[in-house]
Image (spheres, grey):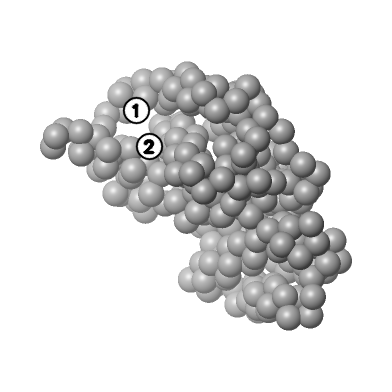
Amino acid sequence: MSAILRHAKTLYLFTKSDIKTTVIPVTLFSLATAPELRGSHVPHTIFWVWLHLLQFDVSNQTLCPDEDKHNKKDRPLPSGRISLNDAKVLRWALIPICWAISYLYSVETFYTSIALSFLTMVYNEFGAHAGYWVVRNLSVAVCYGSFELGATLVASANREALDKIAIAAICISSGILATTYHAQDLKDIHGDRIAGRRTLPIVSPTIARLSVAGGLLIWSVGLILMWKLQWDAMLTFLAPALLTAYRFLVLKTVPEDQVSFYWYNVWLSCVHALPGYYRHFYT
């Protein structure tokens, strides 16, 4: 039993830092977006998202394990909980595991899992994560959209198809990440510079801040119109957008950018809740 618990903790530590940025928001997105949500499907949704996140994170963390020795020492590789060779075996073993479990839900979920495995390789092994910021943003957007697609399928009563509202919500979410994902890169600028990455905050810090702030405001106005928000909901939605935009424009130290990124995720969580709002009031 102690060995099982140790291995379970090792798997958890691979994904620990991304629970709040992927598992929680993607799960909440799927609950708000699913055409016919089934409460009994929620645990399955959480597990599906976490399992595919594990595949992504093990892939990512086996590429350059020495990088984590300086700022993420609790991860399994720098802490010595697992060897690099064993982690690489786990990385490739997770692909058929993810595919097999996804196939149990539906063929469409299976195809989504295949897409996520391919996108994981594009981002990690093929080097999109370290490439020019446009390629990095687009690959993250498509990958995140695949997470949302799979999670929404698993959460839905019908796991073989989604309606127009769900498809629109997934496309919007991917578009937001494609145009504002570098909000995360602002707080990681020093580590990215050392690693030789070409993120937008490194290439052009001023444009990076203006595009994040402007993107939040433009997307917010568009979403207010699209999802037909009433006055109280509109003001509640605009508040974190305005605060986050202000912070990224005015507060520019790394600790301040870390706080700003938390507010960015608050705003993104509000974005993810809007399809549920629309379903409640207009369908």
> What residue do we see at 69% from left, 39% from top?
142
Q: Is residue 33 above or below residue 117?
A: below
> What residue do we see at 65% from left, 65% from top?
270
Residue 161 — which label?
Answer: none
Query: Distance between the Cα atoms at labels 1 and 2?
Result: 11 Å
Quadrant assignment for the N terminus: top left
Q: Residues within 10 Å of mark 2 (few under 14, many from 20)?
A: some
Question: Are the two marked residues, 1 and 2, in contact with CB atoms closer than 8 angstroms?
Answer: no
Residue 65 — which label?
Answer: 2
Kind of residue at disc 2:
Pro
Q: Is residue 5 above or below residue 86?
A: below
Q: Which of 80 and 41 lies nearest the eye of the viewer? A: 41
Q: Circle 1 — which element? A: helix
> What residue do we see at 78% from left, 49% from top?
165
Q: Which of 54 and 76 lies nearest the eye of the viewer? A: 54
Q: Which of 76 and 256 lies nearest the eye of the viewer? A: 76
> What residue do we see at 61% from left, 47% from top?
37
Residue 87 — which label?
Answer: 1
The percent position of residue 38, horizontal first and vertical second, equals 56, 45
